[in-house]
Amino acid sequence: MAALRAHPPSPLAPWAEIVPDVPYPMTVDELHALPDDRWTYELVQGVLVRMLLSSGRASSIGYRLGARLGTYVEDNGLGVITGEQGGYCLDPAHPRDTEVAPDVAFVRADPLSWLLMVSVQRNV
């Protein structure tokens, strides 16, 4: 994937590349309005970053990890595990500045934890 990068990694989001020529700061609403293309986008502190789709190997690892965590979490009533399509706000103080989509995520059973899940907020 490094050969496909247009720009070097940024300390802001070392797993991705910053999208050039986009008016900043960007909001989560603007992120959701982007057209579908071959990229996966996230918003980090108002900065749009992009990644290529995960490889089959990475997807398989995420699936296996999620399956094992899901069993443990469910058996112990700890919360829920989500896959790569869940959008998360990691900074409740600035909920419109950041949304990331981890390959696997854990949301504890505490009802306030659900506020971090952007996709849940949009569907309520």
Image: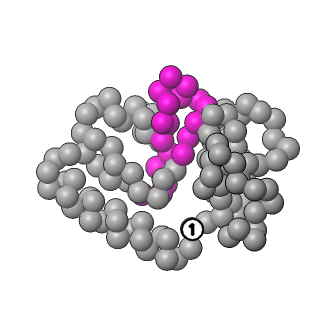
Q: Label 1: state its secondary structure.
A: loop
Q: Amino acid at mark 1?
A: Ser
**Badge 1 is on which residue?**
54
Majority secondary structure in the magenta region: loop
* Residue 71 percent across, percent down from the top left: 21, 61
Judge whether residue 36 can be spotted in this image.
no
In this picture, is 2 found above or below 25?
below
* Magenta region includes residue 84: yes
Q: Residue furthest top?
A: 93
Judge whether residue 14 can be spotted in this image.
yes
- Quarter of the C terminus within the rendering: top left
Q: Which residues are magenta?
A: 83-100
Give the image's coloring scheme: one colour
* Left or right for 4, reference 14: right
Residue occupying image coordinates x 34% and y 49%:
106
* Residue 13 percent across, percent down from the top left: 62, 47
- Quarter of the N terminus within the rendering: bottom right
